[in-house]
Amino acid sequence: MLKKENRLKKKKEFNYIYRKGKVFYTKFFKLYVVSTKSKFCKVGFSINNKIGNSVVRHKLKRRLSEIVKDLIFSLQIKNYVLVAVKGVELLDFEQLTIQVEQIFKKALENETI
C-alpha cells in the first residue's frame, strides 16, 4: 500500500485533477497529471463499477497500488490519477505492471505538463 502522504483521497482533489490535468491514454488506462505545490508525489486510483464486481475492483486497486509504490521514486512531484478502462481486469500482474510503467513513461517523456 502507498504511504499516507502519497495517496489522493478527497473527492475535490480528484475533481481538480480531472478538470485541470493533462491526460495520457493507453489501451487499458487513462492518466491525469497536474502540477502541485506539495513536497510529495500523490497518486489516486479510479476504477469504474463496470469493471467486475467489488472483489475484482479492490484486487485491481491493491495491485495498482503495489506497482505504483515501486515506481513512485522515479516520478516527478505531481499529482496523478490513474483511471482503469474496461478490459484491464483480464490482465495478470506482469502485464499490468508493463501497462502501468508504459503510461507513466509516456507522462514523464512529456515534460511540458
Image: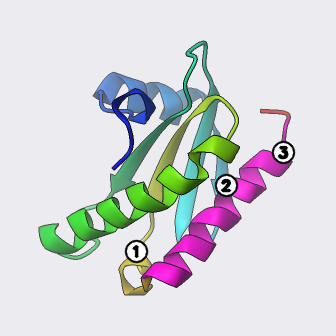
Residue 97 is inside the magenta segment: yes
Left or right? Give the position of 8 relative to 22: left
Looking at the image, tell me whether mark 1 or mark 2 is earlier in sequence order: 1
Give the farthest residue toward the left: 54
Marks 3 and 1 close (CB-CB < 8 Å): no
Q: Which residue is drawn at 70% across and 35% down?
A: 76
Q: Is residue 54 left or right of residue 16?
A: left
- Please name the residue that numbered disc 1 is placed on: 86
Q: Identify residue type, mark 2.
A: Phe
- In this view of the protein, can residue 17 be seen by the observer? yes
Residue located 62% across and 38% down the image: 33
What sort of colour scheme is used for the picture? rainbow
Q: Which amino acid does label 1 sit on?
A: Lys
The residue that appears at 33% across and 50% down in the rendered structure is 1
Q: Mark 3 points at which residue?
A: 110
Magenta stretch, residue numbers: 93-111
The residue pinned by badge 2 equals: 104
- Predominant secondary structure in magenta? helix
> Upstream in the sequence, badge 3 or badge 1?
1
Mark 2 and mark 3 in contact? Answer it, CB < 8 Å: no
Going 56% across and 31% down the picture, which residue do you hit? Answer: 41
Comparing 76 with 34, the one in front is 76
Comparing labels 2 and 3, the label whose residue is closer to the camera: 2
Q: Does the magenta stretch include residue 44?
A: no
Quadrant that contains the C terminus: top right
Locate residue 66, reporting x and y percent.
41, 59
* Residues tagged 1 and 2 counted as in contact (Cβ below 8 A): no
